[in-house]
Amino acid sequence: MFAKKSKTISSWGAVFAWAFLAGLLALVAIQLNSAQRGVLTRGEPAPEFTLTTFEGEVIGPENLVGKVVLVNFWASWCKPCEQEAAALQSAWELYEPRGDVLFVGVDYADTQNEALAYLKRFAITYPNGPDLGIRIYYAFRARGVPETFIINKLGEVAFVKIGPFESLDEITMAIDRLLEP
């Protein structure tokens, strides 16, 4: 009887081990597929996403229609993100009154306390929220932080910036050309 019980337990252990291995292989396959597709490029449809901000506001596809949208992936531990923080905030202050431009900050792989401290330190007022499960990050096929995607009013990727913006002028040049009639 004892031998039978031990054999049953080891059978279940083998099933769990194989299931874990299959799940791990599926995760690796998803990552490899994403890596092969590369970063989103100009002209591709922007992925739909929903982000709940740190203030509890929900930003979804319905908020983006007909607007130029700047999506910035950042993290509090990212030193290059600090280099562009002031320029992004200044650009937001320029465009916010228009109503046809929206900035969305997506906090990547961070803790809420550190992220909120970062936003406070740089006086960032545009909507920001955590990317729980890094779903938005993967949807945009991002590779690191900072990365910024600017989406035109038709919902297409119009500009991709890998690494930090160097100046306010660099941001406004990318956005202004999308606002021309």
Image (tube, helix red, strand yellow):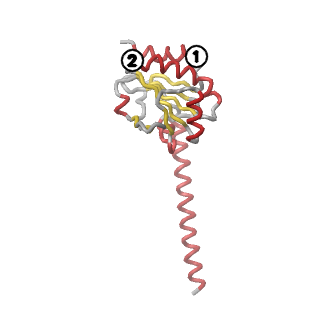
Give residue 164's position: percent from left, percent from top: 59, 24
Q: Residue furthest right?
A: 79
Q: Is residue 79 above or below residue 94?
A: below
- Given residues 17 and 138, the one toward you in this image is 138
Give residue 56's position: percent from left, percent from top: 43, 39
SS category of the residue bearing label 1: loop
Q: Is residue 11 rendered to the left or right of residue 59?
A: right
- At 58% from the left and 40% from the top, the residue drawn is 113
**Disc 2 packing (10 Å; few <14; some 14–19; many ≥20):** few
Q: Is residue 77 above or below residue 28?
A: above
Name the mark nearer the viewer: 2 or 1.
Answer: 2
Three-letter amino acid code of the residue under disc 1: Ser
- At 44% from the left and 14% from the top, the residue drawn is 177
Give residue 163's position: percent from left, percent from top: 59, 26
Three-letter amino acid code of the residue under disc 2: Arg
Indicate which disc residue 7 carries. Answer: none
Kindly indicate the quadrant of the structure image that contains residue 68: top left
SS category of the residue bearing label 2: helix
Which corner quadrant holds the N terminus?
bottom right
* Contact? badges 2 and 1 (CB < 8 Å): no
- Given residues 105 and 142, the one toward you in this image is 105
Q: Which residue is mark 2?
A: 98
Q: Is residue 2 rendered to the left or right of residue 132?
A: right
Indicate which disc residue 167 carries. Answer: 1
First-in-chain label (2 vs 1): 2
How many marks can you see?
2
Which corner quadrant holds the C terminus?
top left
Q: Residue furthest bottom?
A: 1
- Given residues 65 and 162, the one toward you in this image is 65
